[in-house]
Image (cartoon, grey):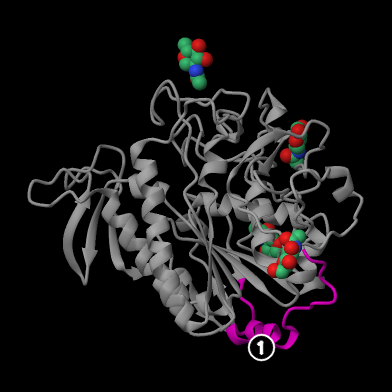
């Protein structure tokens, strides 16, 4: 089980052996007391004088104007999630494994020889405005005394790493260079945490070989407790100012569902007496439970809960566990008739619906909820996955072509451009 044991303000994670099937990290310190962050937040409120308002420029304004530092104050609002990727030819990589040694080999496509580095030379351009590039100093300045937790699967972690690398330009986090589940920006009193919780709710791999209860061979079978938010993160959620929640891909795995301790159905378990409710059921209920926990956690009253919608994978010419690959070298355009598959579309819709339901409840509790509707932007980037150009550890991760995660630097950085805009824009 991944539930950390808490003692004297430090959370000890399970042993390396238990954890090494995803990453190799051990400890993370927890901000001494959950309440400290909230008190600091209340005391510093919003730092109005120091934080320049976001430069949201009308479409016609040129980038050089905005690069020149001229602050254009505007109440022009725009949907940053609707747009297209445009060439950004002269932009240097936002970071490299030299400037950000915490960059994990899974995402370090440059190191592992991705032949066409064109994937870093695009920027997300909303239809009605510019989305400024991430400004690390500005973000850290606005986040003084605060903390953010990324909760979810390896794509949540992918975004967490992007943020850590982007911020490293302004301040080196501690720990540095060795990888961690928590990064502290001590000069700014800001910290970034990561909670591994790919189903968001309590989950146990009951049958790793998938041999029993009809699980597909080799795929493993999970027991999901759909009404029990994973205490690994939920017990700490109240201590954070910002929670960024994203999950989805693990729901494809064969699993059996429990509610109030009773077996209610499954996804792909192939057991004759268990109703196959598909991942539509588990995804919906897991999000419902997780968002309820994120909103209802006692603690910080000024909490913001961000839900990032699914990031689609891009296997073509085959399946993820077969010959599928992602070899395109440029983003899709609207005119390319590419669409997400029906399951991905439905997963997206479920997340948006559960977000909307939770938001109504959150408002009454004074918790702010924000939807990072990044699915379309990410769906347009078949060129930006590692494919075979990444650290490959077949003993841990059998898939030979990774068309799920995102190379760093790369498309995922745009999600943090969005995050900055959403949180302090
Ligand atoms: C800002 O809002 C004010 C009042 O709502 C409006 O008169 C003004 O035109 C707006 N400015 C811009 C740039 O949208
Ligand atoms: C960083 O990436 C370069 C290629 O871009 C590679 O040659 C180098 O070994 C990498 N450094 C580390 C520390 O991984
Ligand atoms: C990583 O760095 C931190 C802080 O410097 C240190 O406490 C920790 O033991 C290091 N972990 C590993 C695996 O080296
Ligand atoms: C799919 O396979 C065809 C034929 O081998 C190849 O020409 C094409 O580039 C492949 N497309 C992608 C996206 O992998």
Whether the magenta-drawn stretch holds residue 401 is answered as no
Q: Secondary structure at mark 1?
A: helix
Residue nearer the viewer, 80 or 180: 80
**Ligand 3 lies in quarter:** bottom right
Q: Give the image location of residue 136, x and y in percent.
A: 79, 58
Q: Give the image location of residue 35, x and y in percent.
A: 60, 87
Residue nearer the viewer, 28 or 340: 340
Q: Quadrant of the C terminus?
A: bottom right
Residue nearer the viewer, 300 or 12: 300
Judge whether 292 appears above or below 174 on screen.
below
Q: Quadrant of the N terminus?
A: bottom left
Q: Which residue is mark 1?
A: 39
Farthest left residue in view: 273
Instruction: Residue at 38% x, 27% y: name it.
Output: 319
Within-10-Å neighbours for mark 1: few <14, some 14–19, many 20+: some
Whether the magenta-drawn stretch holds residue 51 is answered as yes
Q: Which residues are magenta?
A: 29-53
Q: Give the image location of residue 372, x and y in percent.
A: 55, 56
Image-based side of 244 in relation to 292, left or right: right
Instruction: Residue at 63% x, 51% y: name it.
Output: 80
Judge whether 136 appears above or below 12 on screen.
above
């Amino acid at each position: 089980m991944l539930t950390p044991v808490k003692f004297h303000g430090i959370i000890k994670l399970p042993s390396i052996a238990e954890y090494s099937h995803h990453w190799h990290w051990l400890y993370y310190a927890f901000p001494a007391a959950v309440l400290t962050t909230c008190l600091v937040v209340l005391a510093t409120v919003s730092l109005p004088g120091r934080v320049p308002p976001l430069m949201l420029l009308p479409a016609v304004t040129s980038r050089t104007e905005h690069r020149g530092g001229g602050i254009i104050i505007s109440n022009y609002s725009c949907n940053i999630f609707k747009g297209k990727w445009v060439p950004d030819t002269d932009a240097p990589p936002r970071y490299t494994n030299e400037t950000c040694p915490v960059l994990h080999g899974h995402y370090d496509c440059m190191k592992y020889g991705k032949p066409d580095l064109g994937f870093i030379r695009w920027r997300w351009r909303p239809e009605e405005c510019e989305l400024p590039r991430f400004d690390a100093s500005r973000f850290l300045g606005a986040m003084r005394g605060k903390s953010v937790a990324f909760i979810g699967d390896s794509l949540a972690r992918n975004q967490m790493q992007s943020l850590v690398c982007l911020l490293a330009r302004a301040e080196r986090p501690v720990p540095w260079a060795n990888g961690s589940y928590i990064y502290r920006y001590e000069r700014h009193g800001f910290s970034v945490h990561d909670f591994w919780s790919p189903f968001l709710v309590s989950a146990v791999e009951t049958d790793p070989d998938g041999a029993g209860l009809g699980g597909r061979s080799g795929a493993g079978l999970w027991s999901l407790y759909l009404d029990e938010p994973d205490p690994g993160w939920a017990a700490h959620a109240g201590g954070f100012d910002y929670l960024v929640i994203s999950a989805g891909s693990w729901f494809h795995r064969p699993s059996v569902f429990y509610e109030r301790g009773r077996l209610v159905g499954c996804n792909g378990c192939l057991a004759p007496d268990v109703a196959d409710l598909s991942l539509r059921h588990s995804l919906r209920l897991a999000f419902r439970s997780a968002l309820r926990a994120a909103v209802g956690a006692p603690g910080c009253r000024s909490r913001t809960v961000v839900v990032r919608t699914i990031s689609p994978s891009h296997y073509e010419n085959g399946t993820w566990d077969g010959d599928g690959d992602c070899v395109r070298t440029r983003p899709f355009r609207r005119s390319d008739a590419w669409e997400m598959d029906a399951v991905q579309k439905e997963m997206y819709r479920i997340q948006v619906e559960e977000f909307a339901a939770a938001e109504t409840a959150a408002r009454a509790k004074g918790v702010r909820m924000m939807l990072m509707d990044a699915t379309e932007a990410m769906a347009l980037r078949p060129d930006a996955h590692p494919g075979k150009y990444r650290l490959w550890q077949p003993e841990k991760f059998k898939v030979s072509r990774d068309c799920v995660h995102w190379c760093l630097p790369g498309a995922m950085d745009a999600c943090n451009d969005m995050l900055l805009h959403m949180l302090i824009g």
